[in-house]
Amino acid sequence: MIAWLLSFGLRLLTGAHGRWSGCAPVDSQRIYCVNHTSHLDFLLLWTALPARLRRVTRPVAAADYWNAGPVRRYLIQEVFRGVLVDRSGLAPQPLEPVFTSLAQGDSLIFFPEGTRGPGEGLLPLKSGIFHVAQDWPEVELVPVWIDNSYRVMPKGMFFPVPLLCSMTFGAPLRLLEGEEKETFLLRLRNAMLELQPPQ
């Protein structure tokens, strides 16, 4: 109920909607690779998915941020069933929660930049998504571009501003046989950038 109310409120506030330009919203297991400019990003994308896909799609989130306080912890663990990743560098296998979730058949919302970007353009992608693609080659990687979310809730703001947002879903891709890490990351990054709406 809490998830539905937050989603409904955000849809009213931003008109959040998905443009399926490169694929259809089918029931395949997927990793949605999304640009990251706001703490609302995973909720915006989750809102744009059909209800049947929302039930099986979980956000990959930073444990240090979402475990900082009981409200955040409750929302990410109990409401959105987030997959929490340790970014401290101390965990021997930081992607283990991601692999466990994929083994359970979940789809994931993944931010390959690893942190929030400035709003326009895209930071270089971290290597985590390459290792996930290596270990789970059968799972589709869907590039997604969220437009305008950094204006809806800029860094340092606690309440969203009513502005239109859209999510553009591109054509799925996979790691090619023998493809090097840097080549793959550049290919994925370009696929995401190509989804930006014309300025």
Image: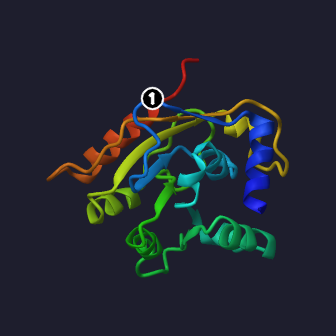
Up/down of 111 relative to 105, above or below: above
Colour convention of the picture? rainbow
Q: Amino acid at mark 1?
A: Ser
Q: Which x, y percent locates residue 81?
A: 61, 69
Is residue 94 shown above or below 151?
A: below
View extreme (front): residue: 52
Residue occupying the point 51% across, 46% down: 34
Q: Nearer the viewer, residue 181 or 129?
A: 129
Residue 100's place in the image compared with 199, above or below, is: below
Residue 13 locus on image (x, y percent): 80, 38
Image quarter of residue 126: bottom left
Label 1: how many Cα within 10 Å (few below 14, some 14–19, many 20+): few
Q: Residue at x 43, y 41 (%)?
A: 143
Q: Secondary structure at mark 1?
A: loop
On the rendered structure, is 140 left or right of 54?
left
Q: Position of residue 6 (x, y in %)?
A: 77, 53
Residue that badge 1 annotates = 21
The residue positioned 27% from the left and 61% from the top of the image is 134
